[in-house]
Amino acid sequence: MSNFILDETRCTGCGTCTFVCPKSLLVLENGRPVMPEEIAHKCNSCGQCTAYCPEDACRQALDAGQTLPRAPRADASTAAKMDLFLKARRSYRMFTARPVPRTVTEGILDAANYAPTGGNNRKIRWILTDSIFKTRMLRDMITDWMDTECRVHPVLSKRYDIDSIIARQRKGRDIILRGAPCTAFTVGPKNIVWGGVDSGIAMTYFNMAAEARDIGCCFAGYAANAAKYSPKIREFLGIGEDEDCYCAIVFGYKTIHAQRIPARPPINCNFV
């Protein structure tokens, strides 16, 4: 069954939707766009027809009946503000104990949900801890994992200075979750082609949406690997046997704010 819905009272037959459909599933018949039933199953609800229709005549089943917000039009001032915002982003490792309200986190996730995915497959799902109690439980489990299973892992045992990490953790200096009150993980089916890439993009969206709310983030490699390899942590987080953990981030309210944007070395780039 087709996901494409047309409001014929609005449609002018301009053909924009047929032009922007990535899979060329829409055709004009008698001046109106149609998605033939024999190919309708190929539609992945990417929303291009809805996004670009100048008359607001196209809808997909996901947004039928909704009043959709207008897409903003960028200009030179938008570019300057966005460039500055992106350059100002820092990895934050100093957090207050103040929990992030779930409604705020849900707003961040709503923005992250618009991150692009390979083929619009949307196979990634999120797992979060948003209470200090649960996050500290997770921190302690990761510490124990590093002090046991990680020591005999053929790769991680060589990558990490485990003795140093454990010593600092036992002394109360949390370098695993950085004292953050909240964590977020992206997980998905094992061996999906773009799992790692999709997760990295989604986490970046999450990070920037959090920054827009003055919430700091730091990517958490220790936590991601623990959720990938530790059965105990996977059970705690609810990761299925057929799933992998692809990425992790910690987040919370900042104790300190960056005052300026440091310089970076020239970018390594070739135009061919």
Image (tube, grey):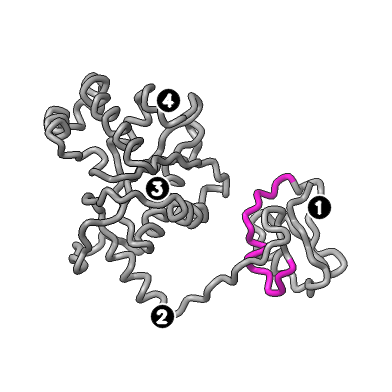
For disc 4, the neighbor class at 10 Å (few under 14, some 14 to 19, many from 20) is: few
Distance (Cα) linking label 3 and label 2: 28 Å
Q: Which mark is residue 200?
A: 3
Left or right, residue 213 beside residue 63: left
- Res 226 quadrant in image: top left
Residue behind mark 1: 36
Q: Which mark is first along the chain, 2 or 1?
A: 1
Q: Which mark is first along the chain, 2 or 3?
A: 2
User: From what the image shows, is residue 154 above or below residue 16?
Assistant: above
**Residues in magenta, as a range:** 41-57
Q: Secondary structure at mark 1?
A: loop
Foreground label between 4 and 3: 4
For disc 2, the neighbor class at 10 Å (few under 14, some 14 to 19, many from 20) is: few
Is mark 1 in CB contact (under 8 Å) with mark 2? no
Q: Which mark is residue 76?
A: 2
Instruction: Identify the amino acid type marked 4.
Output: Glu
Residue behind mark 4: 235
For disc 1, the neighbor class at 10 Å (few under 14, some 14 to 19, many from 20) is: few
- Res 108 quadrant in image: bottom left
Q: Secondary structure at mark 3?
A: helix
Q: Which mark is first along the chain, 4 or 1?
A: 1
